[in-house]
Amino acid sequence: MIKHESIETNAGLLIILTLVAISIGGLVEIVPLFYINDTVEDVRTPEGYEAVRPYTPLESAGRDIYVREGCFLCHSQMIRPFRDEDLRYGHYSLAAESKYDHPFQWGSKRTGPDLARVGGKYSNEWHVQHLMNPRSVVPESIMPNYPWLAENELHYADIKKRLLAQKRVGVPYSVTDEEYEENVKRFGPEVAKWLDINRAEENLLAQAEANNYDGNPDKLTELDALIAYLQVLGTMVDFKQYDESYFVKFRVSKAGQTDGK
C-alpha cells in the first residue's frame, strides 16, 4: 500500500496520479455522450419552427453586459431535475436551451436565485428597480446596486463584429441570402429578420425603441440591453406542448434502444 506521504513528497508520482484521476473523471462524463441518441431536445413552436433561437442583437449585447458585470458569479442558469427546484423555478433546464450560449451560464453557485426562467416573471419596471436598488423590491437581498447601467449609453457600433464572432462558433446568424433563407425555414420569417447580421444595428434599435426596457425613451442604455436579455431567459420553450415522457427519450442510449428491439 502506498502511503500518502510517499505520494506527496514525490512530485513526479503525484503529477501522474493526478492526471490519472482527472482522466478517469473526464471519461466518466464524456464517454456516455457517445452512446446517447441525441442529447439536444427537439423543441418546436406550434408552427413547426425551432423554438430555441439565437439571441437578437439587443439581447446579445445584454448578455455581454451580464457576463461583464459578473452576474454569473451569484446566479446560475441551470435548473436541476429535482422536485424542490421544479416547484421554485419551473421545468428543469434542457440542453437545447443553452445550445447557442458561448460561454454557458450553467453552474450551482446561488448566492442569488437561479435565473434560467426569470424571463417574463417580473415586469421591466421591476427589473429596473431591482438593478438600481435590489433592497427596494427584495428587502433581504445582498446584491449590490448597479446604478451605472442606467447612466451608461449602450455602445453597439461593434455589434456586427460580435455577432460574426458568434457565427464563427456555430450560432446561425445570417450574412448571405442563402443563410437568411435557411433561417426562415428553421426559425420562421419573423425570427429570421432578427438574426440578419446585415441589419444588426437596425434591429437592435428597433427592439429597444419598441420595448423601452429601462423606462427612458430618450436614451439607449446598458440597462435596456441587460433587461432585454433577462426577459428572454427561459421563454423560448412552451412546456405546455409537451408531455414529460417526450424529453425522456433524449436521455435513452442507443445501446438501450438496441437491447429493447
Image: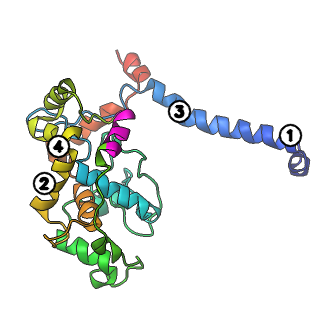
Report, in whole angstroms, how far the alpha carbon at label 4 lies from the one at label 2: 10 Å
- Determine the image quadrant of residue 232: bottom left
**Nearer-N-terminus badge (1/4):** 1
Between 159 and 121, which is closer to the camera in this rendering? 159
The amino acid at mark 3 is Ile
What colour-coding does the image apply?
rainbow
Between 17 and 3, which is closer to the camera in this rendering? 17
* Viewport quadrant of the C terminus: top left
**Residue extent of the magenta highlight:** 161-170
Q: Main secondary structure of the magenta part?
A: helix
The amino acid at mark 2 is Ala
User: Marks 1 and 2: which is nearer the front?
Assistant: 2
The residue under the point 30% across, 78% down is 132
* Viewport quadrant of the N terminus: top right
Give the image location of residue 171, x and y in percent: 32, 36
Report, in whole angstroms, how far the alpha carbon at label 1 lies from the one at label 4: 55 Å
Give the image location of residue 157, x and y in percent: 29, 52
Residue designated by label 2: 206
Give the image location of residue 258, x and y in percent: 39, 16
Q: Residues within 10 Å of mark 4 (few under 14, many from 20)?
A: many
The amino acid at mark 1 is Gly
Residue designated by label 1: 12
Drawn side of residue 74 relative to residue 61, left or right: right
Q: Which mark is residue 30?
A: 3
Answer whether residue 48 is magenta in the image: no
Drawn side of residue 160 relative to residue 193, left or right: right
Give the image location of residue 75, x and y in percent: 41, 63
